[in-house]
Amino acid sequence: MAIELHPECRRFINQQDGVVARPQALELGLGAEFLKNRIRYGEWKRLQRGVYATHSGRPSREAQLWAAMLRAGPDAVLSHQTAAERQGLLKQPSSLIHISVPEARNPSRHGKIPGVVIHRSDVIVSTRYPGGTLPCTRIEDTVLDLIKVSKSFDAKYNWICLAIGGRLTTAERILDALAKRKRFPARREAELMLGYAAEGILSWLERQWAEGVERQHGFPTARRQVKVRQGTTSKYLDNLYEDYRVCVELDGKAAHPEEERRFDEARDRWNLAHGKVVTMRYQVPDLRDQEHRCEKAAEMAVVLRDHGSAVGGPCEDPRCQERFAEFRIRISESAERSRVPLSRPQSVAIASSGLPFVS
Ligand SMILES: [Zn+2]
């Protein structure tokens, strides 16, 4: 027989996705005997110690989260991977539920909480997300917490790319949150990453270009994600070396459908015709290790020299110096054969103060 609860009592429990903690139930006037019988007759289900689903069906994800939170206590917030799941950084639910509590509290002291990882930090006391029903760390702190627990630079940077690339926050706001943390083990590394992100470098591939090719070989810094007009529409160029009229487009997708490739080619022709901008395109395999990045740098040195002035040079790797020298010889030989002068193209008619189609 289904037990009808008082409407007010039902409303309260519904706000917690049908989950109630024992002290709450007692406060709502449901006696200890009543609770015991609901469990005994299988009408309610125990989800955590002293926390019940007020039905016998399979608990939803929300109900599981509520159960873990109610078990962890009143100051708890969802954090780390579980906050990431709630905030759209992760597509799949995290296998373990991550919860943060103030340092003075230790919800696991009476036994481990099944399926839950408890983090203890005083930062969350001041950063607890005010809205919503299930309390969660703010997105900026979720990112910082995840950077803290990630091992590699790539893994750490990926959280920043997901949050900022997904337009959930900005580099500036994460830096603000970082400044408020007295202790942060990877602070300098995080600041470097956020500097990249603020520049518009929001993927592994873009970072390899900016750092492994551009910076290490002394090229000028490109303008990133430059909005350009193409007829009636607007597009973004990944890296524009405006003074050289050279653009570098990076494509991180694993597969590149034929239709998309044709679209890209049409776009590159448009850039060439209307802005006299030459487009170079690179994919993940092109920049997969330093050897490949050095090779693209040697190629880029020639392209930039042909479109303006000689810039950049080999990095510290001795093989890179050989490659640069080799590239220069190969290019000048082929130029000699085809009698194409290696000088700046005739684009003086366009004002040097900027490209006509760049916003
Ligand atoms: Zn190099």
Image (cartoon, helix red, strand yellow):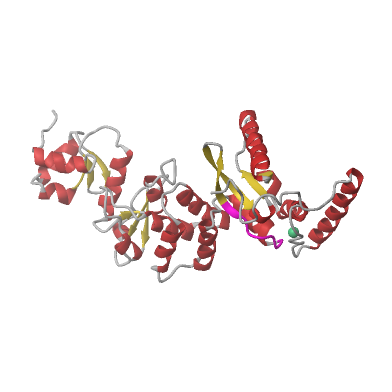
**Residue 325 drawn at (x, y percent):** 85, 58
Q: Residue 97, can we see it?
A: no
Residue at 35% across / 65% down in the picture?
A: 123
Q: Main secondary structure of the magenta part?
A: loop
Asked whether, in this view, residue 4 is left or right of residue 316, the answer is left
Residue at left 41%, top 64%? 176
The quarter of the picture showing ligand 1: bottom right
Whether the magenta-drawn stretch holds residue 218 is answered as yes
Given residues 28 and 209, the one toward you in this image is 209
In the image: residue 130, left or right of residue 24: right
Of residues 171 and 240, the one nearer the viewer is: 240
Per the image, is 19 magenta? no
Q: In this picture, is 26 found above or below 106? A: above
Magenta residues?
A: 217-224
Image coords of residue 243 (percent x, y): 66, 56
| Residue 132 shown left or right of residue 243 in the figure | left
Quadrant for residue 20, please give it.
top left
Residue 285 horizontal/vertical position (percent):
69, 44
77 vs 305, nearest the viewer: 305
Where, quadrant-wise, is the N terminus in this rendering?
A: top left
Residue 180: image quadrant is bottom left
Side of 58 relative to 172 (left or right):
left
Q: Is residue 61 visible?
A: yes
Q: Position of residue 184 (x, y in %)?
A: 45, 67
Q: Residue at x 49, y 54 (%)?
A: 160
Q: Is residue 194 above or below residue 16?
A: below
Q: Is residue 26 above or below residue 54?
A: below
Number of dots carrying numbers? 0
Identity of the residue furthest to the front in this view: 349
